[in-house]
């Protein structure tokens, strides 16, 4: 069985120590061989899109991406033969998600929006389509950087981190 690795690149210029790679925004697909070597197979340039977090469905049929610059949530079908991607669907979002996950039924995609100060839940359809309107959207303070449901699928964990007035990091401020 082949192993594919999906990596995002962005032309965004971030403040602080993390800077752009200088590569155009997009998704690169690599094959990982038995020796641990990565070989670039496909490159999907997405100027002005800024893909960042990616999440793959457990059945490995679809990959979802938050396109941060264009503020979209998009799905791509994965070709199991060569790892290539075909765009299936996208919806506009109010902000750019910094983290994506699925609930335990894999029927919903959850997003945490660091600068947007919110979390969302969108219904998924089996063909990679994403419901245009969120099932739920909850405002939070800025700094939501993760969202995951517990094993019972009844509760979602949403840690926060934000800057204090002096610019230093503050742990889990909500």
Image (cartoon, rainbow, N blue to C red):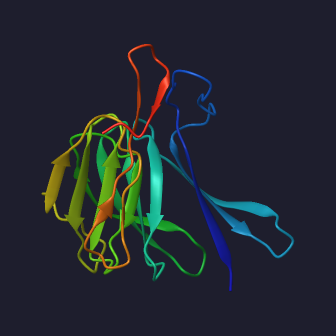
**Residue 89 image offset from top left, x and y in percent:** 28, 62
Task: Say left or right for 159 vs 13.
Answer: left
Q: Is residue 134 visible?
A: no
Which residue is outermost to the top?
A: 166
Query: Nearest the camera: 169 or 49?
Result: 169
Instruction: Give the residue at x 49% y 30%.
Output: 12
Number of labelled discs? 0
User: In the rendered image of this protein, does residue 111 appear above or below residue 13?
Assistant: below
Query: Nearest the camera: 81 or 1?
Result: 1
Instruction: Work out which quarter of the rendered image holds the N terminus and state it.
Output: bottom right
Instruction: Give the residue at x 54% y 68%.
Output: 84
User: In the rendered image of this protein, does residue 85 appear above or below residue 68?
Assistant: below
**Residue 163 image offset from top left, x and y in percent:** 42, 25
Q: Quadrant of residue 47?
A: top left
**Residue 83 image offset from top left, x and y in percent:** 57, 72
Instruction: Work out which quarter of the rendered image holds the C terminus and state it.
Output: top left
User: In the rendered image of this protein, does residue 52 appear above or below residue 81?
Assistant: above
Instruction: Give the residue at x 45% y 63%.
Output: 55
Q: Quadrant of residue 96?
A: top left
Task: Say left or right for 36 vs 72.
Answer: right
**Residue 173 image offset from top left, x and y in percent:** 36, 36
Which residue is outermost to the bottom?
A: 1
Q: Quadrant of residue 34?
A: bottom right
Task: Say left or right for 161 vs 70.
Answer: right
């Amino acid at each position: 069985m082949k192993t594919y690795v999906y990596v995002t690149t962005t032309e965004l210029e971030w403040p602080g120590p993390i800077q752009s790679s200088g590569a155009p925004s997009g998704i690169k697909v690599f094959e990982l061989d038995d020796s641990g070597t990565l070989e670039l197979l496909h490159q999907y340039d997405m100027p002005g899109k800024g893909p960042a977090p990616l999440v793959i469905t457990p059945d490995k049929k679809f990959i979802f991406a938050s396109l941060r610059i264009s503020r979209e949530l998009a799905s791509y079908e994965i070709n199991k033969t060569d790892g290539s991607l075909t765009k299936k669907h996208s919806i506009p979002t109010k902000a750019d998600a910094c983290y994506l996950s699925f609930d335990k039924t894999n029927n919903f995609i959850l997003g945490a929006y660091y600068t947007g100060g919110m979390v969302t839940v969108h219904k998924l359809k089996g063909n990679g389509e994403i419901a245009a309107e969120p099932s739920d959207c909850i405002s939070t303070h800025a700094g939501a950087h993760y969202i995951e449901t517990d094993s019972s699928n009844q509760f979602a964990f949403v840690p926060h981190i934000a800057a204090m007035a002096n610019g230093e990091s503050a742990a889990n401020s909500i």
